[in-house]
Amino acid sequence: MTVLMAPAGTTPSTALLTDHYELTMIRAALRSKTAMRRSVFELFARRLPEGRRYGVVAGVGRAIEAIKAFRFDESALNFLLEENVIDTDLADWLSRYKFKGNVWGYPEGEVYFPGSPLLIVEGTFAEAAMLETLLLSIYNYDSAVASAASRMTAMAGDRPCIEMGSRRANEHAAVAAARAAYIAGFSATSNLEAGRTYAVPTAGTAAHSFTLLHDSEEDAFKAQLKTLGKSTTLLVDTYDIEQAVRTGVRLTKGKLGAIRLDSGDLAEQAADVRKLLDSLGATSTRIIVTSDLDEYQIAALRSAPVDGYGVGTSLVTGSGAPTCGFVYKLVARAESEGKKAELVPVAKKSTNKASVGGRKYALRRLDARGRAEAEVIGIGAPPVDDGNDRGLLVELMRKGKPVARESLEDARERHLRARAELPQAALKMSKGEPAIPTIILDDDGDPTANPYAKQA
């Protein structure tokens, strides 16, 4: 199995992208001689965002790269000592820190459900606990964007979607959003850094300011066409849409690539513009729509003569669910710091925040037609495959080293396959329960209590 990462050497230290208490816990654990106990942490969601029927995994490659870059340099250590976050003993240990454990997880593009063990981190308590905040910050955001993007591309069908939400997000989050959206089926992004770092295709033409800059709309169109060619997309709603369309068609002799609508009743305008374009002989000119689109509006536009969608704000904010609510919990730990000490399951019993102890294994149960029926989670041992089920966990890191690499195209294809396995109800835009149930099996292979069975 391979993981998605940026080119080597592009990530600075990630050591301080964490919470204060990660280090104070380890400081105390070193004193109590428990810090080096072998431990198993799992990252999962207790529930999906309200009404969602499935989620999408993204951020795996970014997370692996962030683990590799988790190093404490002199500047970071001095800051932590000055603030009394750590003492000299912990500073000495941190100066040599390098994650040497094992990581398993769902690969990018896979879909997930409540209780799915998306990431399993095995190592000492000290080395694995420190990664909590970093991993959650990456997974929660990237998967939220990918989950929203998947709903949008499902509604768009074979019409392309372009990510254009950079100005609605933190500048670094914007790059991550473009990557996550591409995994979930978006065809391109407006963000150039995403193009450079992750090879996501980029696209863009002009804003209203470009038209307003020129003495006339025709002058603006001439300049754009001369620079970018007839295949470009002209923004036609700065002044009068009909006049702009007629100008664009005339200047290109009916060979204009596309027009973009960015305001008003998009369905009605698209229908009117399609009729106008066809009447002018520009039958191949495409219609692209933007303007605060989300999956519901894209679904509503399916019957309109629209050829593509540009999506910004809703996408980079998870379309109402800007986080997946993932948690990172200790599920097993050794009884002592001895290398051969037995691992014992541990779990929270907190009201509404219970967890399930024990190392997990997961498969997707499929029916005879290859349709997903359930997420089956085994505790301590893999669930039994009834013949056509699909294992979900893959090895991501071994002894602190990434196992391999893969392309974003591989993740895109995986997502399409995983989404296609789901029951048809999974693609409904109305609120509902998860598309398939999560079944948790005990170490004897029998169903056991499942605190994630119902959404809160």
Image: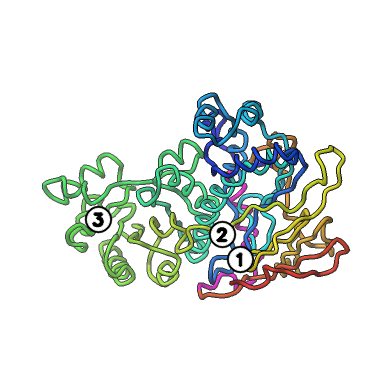
| Residue 128 visible (yes or no) | yes
In depth, the one of 272 and 106 nearer the eye is 106
Looking at the rendered image, the disc whose residue lies closer to the viewer, 3 or 1, is 1
Which residue shows up at 63% across the image and 30% down it?
A: 94
The amino acid sitting under disc 2 is Gly
Q: Circles 3 and 1: CB distance less than 8 Å?
A: no
Comparing 56 with 78, the one in front is 78
Q: Is residue 307 left or right of residue 220?
A: right
Side (left or right) of 224 relative to 103: left
Q: CA distance from mark 1 to mark 2?
A: 8 Å
Query: Are circles 1 and 2 on residues that touch, CB within 8 Å?
Result: yes
Q: Quadrant of residue 27?
A: top right
- Secondary structure beneath disc 3? helix
Image position, residue 253 (x, y; %): 25, 52
For badge 1, the amino acid type reads Arg
**Image quadrant occupied by the N terminus:** top right
| Residue 287 appearing in the image | no
Mark 3 and mark 1: span between their CA atoms?
51 Å
Where is mark 1, residue-wise?
Answer: 47
Residue segment shown in magenta: 407-429
Does 186 sit above or below residue 73? below
